Image: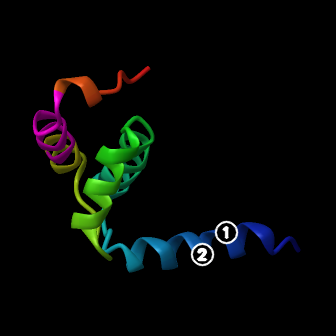
């Protein structure tokens, strides 16, 4: 018997419970949250992470906070994403 799938499932369930994710939409939001964070600049990411603390924000909240951070930066310091 292979225990790897059971171990992976248990770890995934533990992780989702620790993030208070209890439905499929929450899983999608959590995955989108992580993907969105990979596109942020260093300053935007630090700003979002400092506000999240030990919790996590939905993707729309992450995008809003990234926009707020960007709008408060001097134009000469804005980095292009891509």
In the rendered structure, find residue 8 and report the number of the disc placed on it: 1
Is 36 in front, or is 44? 44
Q: CA distance from mark 2 to mark 1?
A: 5 Å
Q: Is residue 73 magenta?
A: yes
Question: Which quarter of the rendering shows the C terminus?
Answer: top left
In the rendered structure, find residue 41 and report the number of the disc placed on it: none
Q: Residue at x 28, y 30 (%)?
A: 77
Q: Residue at x 26, y 55 (%)?
A: 47
Colour pattern: rainbow
Secondary structure of residue under mark 2: helix
Depicted 30 relative to depicted 1: above or below: above
Depicted 26 relative to depicted 6: above or below: above
Q: Quadrant of residue 63?
A: top left
Labels 2 & 1 near each other (Cβ < 8 A): yes
Which secondary structure type mostly characterizes the magenta part of the structure? helix
User: What is the magenta range?
Assistant: 65-74
Instruction: Give the mark count.
Output: 2
Relative image position of residue 71 (x, y in whole percent): 11, 34
Category of crowding for the residue at label 1, using alpha-carbon neighbours closer than 10 angstroms: few (below 14), some (14–19), many (at least 20)? few
Is 24 in front, or is 19? 19
Q: Quadrant of residue 79?
A: top left
Secondary structure of residue under mark 1: helix
Residue on which the image places disc 2: 11
Q: Residue furthest right?
A: 1
Q: Quadrant of residue 52?
A: bottom left
In the shown orientation, is residue 82 left or right of residue 47? right
Question: Which quarter of the rendering shows the N terminus?
Answer: bottom right
Relative image position of residue 4 (x, y in whole percent): 79, 69
Q: Is residue 1 magenta?
A: no
In the shown orientation, is residue 58 left or right of residue 30? left
């Amino acid at each position: 018997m292979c225990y790897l799938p059971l171990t992976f499932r248990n770890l995934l369930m533990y992780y989702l419970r620790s993030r208070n994710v209890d439905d499929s939409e929450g899983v999608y939001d959590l995955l989108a949250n992580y993907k969105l964070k990979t596109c942020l600049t260093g300053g935007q990411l630090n700003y979002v992470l400092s506000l999240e603390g030990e919790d996590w924000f939905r993707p729309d909240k992450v995008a809003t906070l990234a926009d707020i951070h960007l709008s408060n930066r001097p134009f000469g310091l804005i980095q292009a994403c891509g």
